[in-house]
Image (cartoon, rainbow, N blue to C red):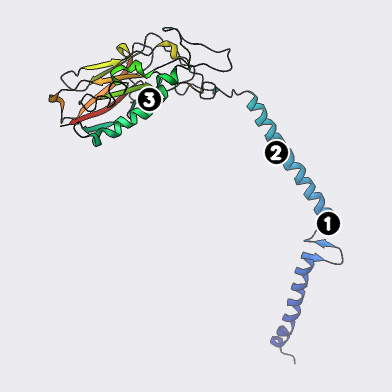
Amino acid sequence: MSNPAIATKEEKPEEQKENQSSWKDFLYNPRTGEFMGRTASSWALIFLFYLVFYGFLAGMFTLTMWVMLQTLDESTPKYRDRVSNPGLVIRPRLMDIVFNRTDPLKYGKYVQNLEAFLKQYNDTEQERNELCVAGQFFEQDDQAEKKVCQFKRSLLRQCSGLSDINFGYAEGKPCVLVKMNRIIGLKPEGDPYINCTAKRETSLQMLYFPSEGRFDKMYFPYYGKKAHEKYVQPLVAVKLLLTKDDYNTEINVECKVEGTNLRNNDDRDKFLGRVTFKVKVIE
């Protein structure tokens, strides 16, 4: 009488051989010439199908992108309704201006920042630009290469860094430059000017350059970085006439653009049409 356990053990090597043979036949069957269950012609047809399919998708994507790009202007964004009003920024590029007026090392970084920024406004550089008509927009819609109106740093007078290389910091009456951010096509209504006030009970005397802190219309509109490559923004210099009573005290100063339709009181954006900075002169 045979033992079932012994018969089972004898069958296992045969089953393993059959499994190995079936895997080998699946990878490559020499009798039918199939590789992984398909003949060479079948694999070629599948490869050709996917090649045509993905080639068609790539062609459609390329055509769609090409058609879309034909509707765009290289110089001007198609949609510009996100920011219709400019923000204000200052130079030196610091919101806290703190220095000892008797120590050049303390206020030197502010002077260097202003001097580096104003190099592009040097009179010799600006004389290469156009002498535009004041009070009128300088529109150049039909010109491929946009011209730039002159803005000489000498217009900033006491804050130009020409007559006073320290921009008033050595005497404790610092200069701060205010400018509007560039917005393509902006043509502000009215007569925009900068007005700064100290956030305290007593007023703070200030001087504005150019006269009355105005942004002349001839510097508008701006046509974009590519079309208007050499464009320079108009500036307003504010000289804070601090006295000894103001020293060693932090003063909050807010500057706004006024006299125009540009917004300056949006609670959601504190830099829209305005900018606030702190000044503290140590003695």
The percent position of residue 250, horizontal first and vertical second, equals 19, 30
The disc at residue 58 is 2
Q: Secondary structure at mark 3?
A: helix
**Mark before the other along the chain sequence, 2 or 1:** 1
The disc at residue 118 is 3
CA–CA distance in space, label 1 to label 3: 73 Å
The percent position of residue 190, horizontal first and vertical second, equals 38, 8
Q: Secondary structure at mark 2?
A: helix
**In which quadrant of the rendered image does the C terminus lie?**
top left
The disc at residue 214 is none
Residue at horizontal 51 percent and vertical 11 percent from the top: 139
Q: Which residue is mark 1?
A: 40
Say if mark 1 contacts mark 3, CB within 8 Å: no
Amino acid under disc 2: Ala
The percent position of residue 31, horizontal first and vertical second, equals 87, 67
Height in image: 33 above or below 263?
A: below
